[in-house]
Image: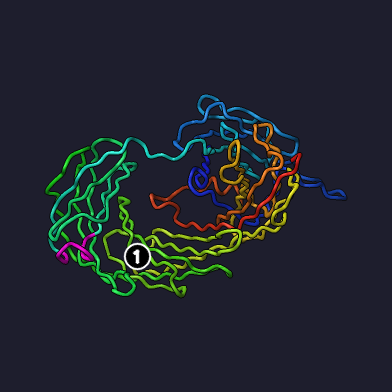
């Protein structure tokens, strides 16, 4: 059976939304009148595994199943596995961190086999930090190799090495730079250099007089690796067009273009902050087998904070035209701003955004005592209440201030199930991604939430 993993919420940005029609498990269908017979939901087992941000199984952690007949709790075993027998769909599922400070609810699921990622541990790179000095000379291209003529350099090793290459450090004839990475004390990869010319007004590239690659370069902890010379050759330029659609009320905040090589070496080519207009024409290098990533973001400032919308597409070819449609933001409707007396039964609602799912987020203010609390509810509906999660040790404290907002993630079909089907295409992430975050509202819980 196919295993489904919720990649979108493993660590980084929790994103969701959309006004789908999947009814939550807490709202079973009502039989119709007359002689119409209501179909019996298909029943079967639901199983899965729970992992933390490092990819290790989360052991002895409660998982809560919520459906029309009530609630059931099981604990994960030594491999992080859990199982529920005889479950009708749709159903809701909830997890909580070991300190009971972060809970996550998945509503309206129909998947039978799941892999869940729990924000139990912060994301940390694997291994200790290593460093080495890399030196060499340039030839070809457009000397001297300093200032605006200094080539941008990238070192690409095996996945997970995390090589950091500083932007500066060199001379009129070559380079000398300290690089850092995590993982093995010695790694081997390819060294790339890209030289560009820029428009003096916009700073955008106008040409690429030098591009070079050197393979089988080995970095060793604490060593100075000399004579790693790179020959540069001019590469032809090509246009790359970007058109951006911005929701009403938001202002375009920035655009960006990056180049991805077959081994996933990554170059940032161009970027603009607060550009005017919505149509952009960039110049990119025509490097064999290279593809391009285009990004755009928009923002809206309000008394309740910053709202944003962003989108990206990967795998674009030089000479192509790409349209990025930034999704609208989900705006809070109920309860009203600064609501008091909020309980588990309070209905939270927001404006619909077409073509995706939502992540309702409720969290205490920074510095809250005894510890910050946060709840995420992933749903295809445009409203939710705070589920009763006391069975897994998560509850709303009395007379406590919270802030809530809704994130949106464009996905088709617009179901929470679809999030489990989506996996990154490459190191660049998803081939298409569009998300937004709406404005926040404050609230205070009741004396008996």
Is 37 displayed left or right of 318 in the figure? Answer: right
Q: Nearer the viewer, residue 304 or 308?
A: 304
Image position, residue 296 (x, y; %): 45, 64
Q: Position of residue 72 (x, y in %)?
A: 69, 31
- Write down the residue under mark 1: 270
Q: Quadrant of residue 84?
A: top right
Q: Nearer the viewer, residue 381 or 171?
A: 171
Residue 392 image offset from top left, x and y in percent: 65, 32
- Judged left or right of residue 350, residue 9 is left
Question: Which span is picked out in magenta?
Answer: 141-151
Residue 285 among those drawn in magenta: no
Please tell me whether residue 389 is drawn above or below residue 325 in the rendered image: above
Q: How many residues crowd mark 1 within 10 Å: few (<14), some (14–19), many (20+)? A: some
For the residue pair 289 and 144, the one nearer the viewer reads as 144
Look at the image and name its color scheme: rainbow
Quadrant of residue 292 within the rendered picture: bottom left
Above or below, 80 relative to 214:
above
Give the residue displayed 70% in from the left and 54% down from the top.
338
The residue depicted at 30 percent of the width and 52 percent of the height is 265
Q: Is residue 11 left or right of residue 212?
A: right
Q: Position of residue 35 (x, y in %)?
A: 86, 48
- Of 273 and 17, nearer the camera is 273
Residue found at x 34% / y 41%: 160
In the image, 398: left or right of 247? right
| Viewport quadrant of the C terminus | top right
Q: Is residue 332 visible?
A: yes
Q: Point out the residue furthest to the right here.
A: 34
Q: Is residue 414 visible?
A: no
Magenta stretch prevailing secondary structure: loop
What secondary structure is marked by label 1? strand
């Amino acid at each position: 059976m196919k295993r489904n993993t919720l990649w979108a919420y493993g660590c980084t940005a929790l994103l969701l939304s959309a006004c789908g029609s999947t009814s939550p498990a807490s709202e079973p269908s009502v039989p119709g009148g007359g002689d119409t017979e209501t179909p019996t939901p298909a029943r079967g087992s639901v199983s899965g595994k729970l992992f933390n941000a490092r990819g290790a199984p989360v052991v002895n952690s409660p998982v809560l199943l919520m459906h029309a007949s009530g609630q059931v709790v099981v604990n994960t075993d030594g491999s992080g596995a859990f199982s529920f027998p005889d479950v009708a769909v749709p159903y809701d599922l909830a997890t909580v961190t070991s300190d009971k400070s972060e809970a996550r609810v998945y509503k309206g699921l129909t998947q039978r086999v799941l892999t869940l990622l729990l924000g139990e541990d912060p994301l940390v790179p694997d291994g200790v930090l290593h460093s080495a000095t890399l030196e060499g000379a340039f030839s070809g291209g457009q000397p001297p190799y300093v200032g605006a003529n200094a080539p941008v350099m990238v070192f690409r090793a095996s996945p997970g090495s995390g090589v950091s290459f500083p932007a500066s450090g060199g001379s009129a004839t070559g380079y000398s730079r300290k690089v850092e990475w995590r993982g093995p004390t010695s790694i081997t990869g390819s060294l790339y250099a890209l030289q560009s010319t820029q428009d003096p007004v916009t700073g955008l590239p106008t040409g690429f007089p030098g591009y070079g690659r050197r393979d089988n370069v080995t970095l060793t902890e604490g060593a100075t690796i000399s004579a790693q010379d790179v020959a540069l050759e001019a590469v032809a330029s090509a246009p790359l067009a970007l058109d951006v659609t911005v929701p009403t009320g938001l202002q375009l905040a920035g655009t960006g273009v990056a180049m991805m090589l077959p081994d996933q070496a990554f170059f940032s080519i161009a970027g603009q902050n607060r550009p005017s207009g919505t149509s952009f024409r960039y110049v990119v290098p025509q490097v064999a087998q290279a593809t391009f990533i285009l990004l755009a973001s928009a923002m809206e400032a309000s008394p309740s904070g910053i709202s944003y919308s962003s989108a990206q597409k990967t795998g674009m070819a030089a000479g192509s035209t790409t349209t990025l449609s930034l999704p609208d933001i989900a705006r809070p409707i109920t309860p009203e701003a600064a609501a008091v007396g909020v309980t588990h039964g309070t209905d939270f609602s927001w404006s619909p955004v077409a073509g995706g799912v939502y992540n309702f987020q409720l969290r205490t203010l920074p510095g809250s005592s005894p510890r910050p609390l946060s709840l995420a509810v992933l749903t295809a509906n445009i409203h939710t209440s705070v589920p009763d999660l006391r069975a897994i040790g998560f509850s709303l404290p009395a007379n406590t201030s919270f802030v809530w907002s809704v994130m949106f993630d464009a996905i088709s079909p617009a179901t929470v199930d679809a999030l489990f089907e989506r996996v990154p295409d490459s190191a660049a992430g998803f081939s298409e991604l569009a998300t937004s975050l709406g404005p926040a509202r404050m609230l205070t819980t009741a004396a008996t939430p």
